[in-house]
Image: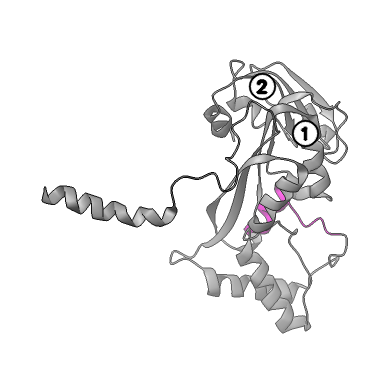
Amino acid sequence: MADRVFDIAKSFPLALDLGCGRSYIAQHLNKDVVGRLFQSDVAEIALKNTLDSEIPRVNIIADEEFLPFKENTFNLVVSSLSLHWVNDLPKALHEVHRVLKPDGVFIGSMFGGDTLFELRCSLQLAELEREGGFSPHVSPFTAVSDLGHLLGRAGFNTLTVDSDEIQVNYPGMFEIMADLQGMGESNCCWNRKPMIHRATMLAAAAVYKELYGNNDGTIPATFQIYYMIGWKFHESQAQPAQRGSATVSFGDLRKINELISGKKKL
């Protein structure tokens, strides 16, 4: 996330970090790029234990869907791996667009649809076998095909969306679940089952190791991450040419090889 901020050749006098946690992004930025940083999160304890940074900061308890800031306030808004907790993602993106100044930029990341697919499949197969049905045990994620549409509908332009995958190897399924619980990333759905039977859990662990296990006895956990960049419109931004104004056809590109081969003969 910090690398993407540094890639933009401009400074940001006022920035906002949504879902900052313990200010993981701020410690990788500097005051030459960000003049002042507002950090917001719904977790009060996280804000009280923020990490040190050279950037002047203000901590605010706030919900992403109801940002307590005026319109056209920030030059930059960042959000790292917190938007999957939002109940109404379109409204949260609309709020981000509202508080950005014209020519302001939003840089965010969130977990993608293939995150923890090994764990989800193993739990589903075990529940189907032992209990005759299954229910979700991992929070829902957004598909990359929907993300660009949501950003565009919120008012952003010059969109960029890319994805990355990180695999972490664990001794077993129970270590993965303990790690997720320690990160505060357990299932947040209200309609989830209150408990899973011990026999089902043991069966899921066996299915996990059988289907996805590594040769050294460990099992992988996949985390898919979507990165997004969107700008708020300003007249100074580069605009696409009018439709039909092109003077060269893409069909003429096939002639390039003919021109190159002709020059070689000469």
Highlighted range, magenta: 175-189
Instruction: Give the quadrant of the N terminus.
Output: top right
Q: Is residue 39 left or right of residue 166?
A: right
Give how far across and how far down residue 14 sits, in percent. Answer: 72, 20
Judging from the image, what secondary structure is the residue with disc 2 in? loop
Q: Amino acid at mark 1?
A: Ala
Give how far across and how far down residue 248 sits, in percent. Answer: 43, 47
Marks 2 and 1, the one that precedes in the sequence: 1
Above or below residue 217? Residue 158 is above
Q: Residue at x 55, y 70 (%)?
A: 209
Judging from the image, what secondary structure is the residue with disc 1 in? helix
Label 1, on which residue? 46
Residue 179 shown in magenta = yes
Give how far across and how far down residue 111 sits, in percent. Answer: 66, 51
Q: Residue at x 60, y 50 (%)?
A: 225
Can see residue 184?
Answer: no
Tell me, for residue 105, which label it has, or none.
none
Separation of residues labelled 2 and 1 (CA atoms): 13 Å
Q: How many marks?
A: 2
Label 2, on which residue? 52
